[in-house]
Amino acid sequence: MNSVIVCIKQVPETTDVKINPETNTLVREGVKSIINPFDMYAIEEAVRLKEKFGVKAIVLSMGPPQAEAALREAISMGADEAYLASDRAFAGSDTLATSYTLAKAIKKIGDFSVILCGKQASDGDTAQVGPGISTHLDIPQVTYVKKIEEIKENTARVERMTEEGFEILECPLPCLFTVVKEINEPRLPSLKGIMKSKSAKIHLLTAQMLELEEDRIGLKGSPTQVVKIFSPERRKGGEIYSGAAEEGVDKLVAILKKELYA
């Protein structure tokens, strides 16, 4: 088994999101940033695979220079190396441009057996970047992984969470997994890990270093763009129905039709 690469994202800590009405962007000034909560489980799983197989656990992020703090935290938890894809040319990237950039960064880093991502980011909630990376790399993917049961020389067997329960799937290596919080309990950084993270080298990857196609990164490479962001108006009142489920559904559908076609 070769190295394990974890893709992480730095996100605002607060759930009380504020929006700049003039620029239609999130207000990040004065808001503490953290590692995307779902990515913490991916980091933990990578460190566990490192401990079991003796491979390198590598963390990768794409973002502004301050994202370096998230990478150092991952190192304090047990990751071995860290890479930051950071360039002004990446500004405005949507999930397609982001996944393309991260995939090229992974190719630059080198051989790997498993890529791990959190199932989604708390600020975007699209769950598209992980699957996008696997598509650009042309490798298998399994989403919503709740347990890595076994990894052999050329295959991995995992449990994938579904709405009805779970599936057991086997796929060839290399592959990409997006993980859910049920997979493990992230560890706290050790004192040794914290000391290591302070002096660890963060490898910078720029657009030129990755030899990216200009029309596939940043705003130019993003077919989807955020035109407007706003907080939905909250309506007061409502109605609680306590009867039979079938009758409740019929009543709800009737109310929605009335609202839609009024």
Image: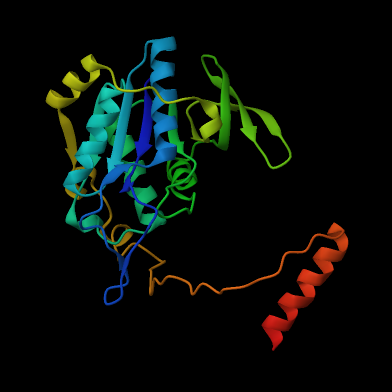
Query: What's the coloring here?
Result: rainbow
Q: Position of residue 37 (x, y in %)?
A: 41, 39
Q: Residue furthest left?
A: 199
Residue 41 sits in quarter: top left
As drawn, 13 above or below 155 = below
Q: Residue at x 18, y 19 (%)?
A: 196
In the foreground, 218 or 256: 256
Q: How many marks do you count on the picture?
A: 0
Q: Quadrant of the N terminus?
A: top left
Question: Is residue 1 visible in this depiction of the protein?
Answer: no
Q: Position of residue 148 (x, y in %)?
A: 55, 23
Question: Is residue 35 visible in this depiction of the protein?
Answer: yes
Q: Position of residue 111 (x, y in %)?
A: 35, 25
Q: Residue at x 49, y 49 (%)?
A: 127
As drawn, 161 above or below 257 = above
In the foreground, 259 or 116: 259
As drawn, 15 above or below 49 = below
Q: Seen in the image, is 175 located left or right of residue 35?
A: right
Q: Quadrant of the C terminus?
A: bottom right
Q: Residue at x 22, y 14 (%)?
A: 192
Residue 220 sits in quarter: bottom left
Q: Position of residue 26 (x, y in %)?
A: 31, 63
In the foreground, 91 or 37: 37
Q: Residue at x 50, y 25 (%)?
A: 184
In the foreground, 129 or 111: 129
Q: Seen in the image, is 185 located left or right of residue 219?
A: right
Q: Seen in the image, is 251 located left or right of residue 153?
A: right
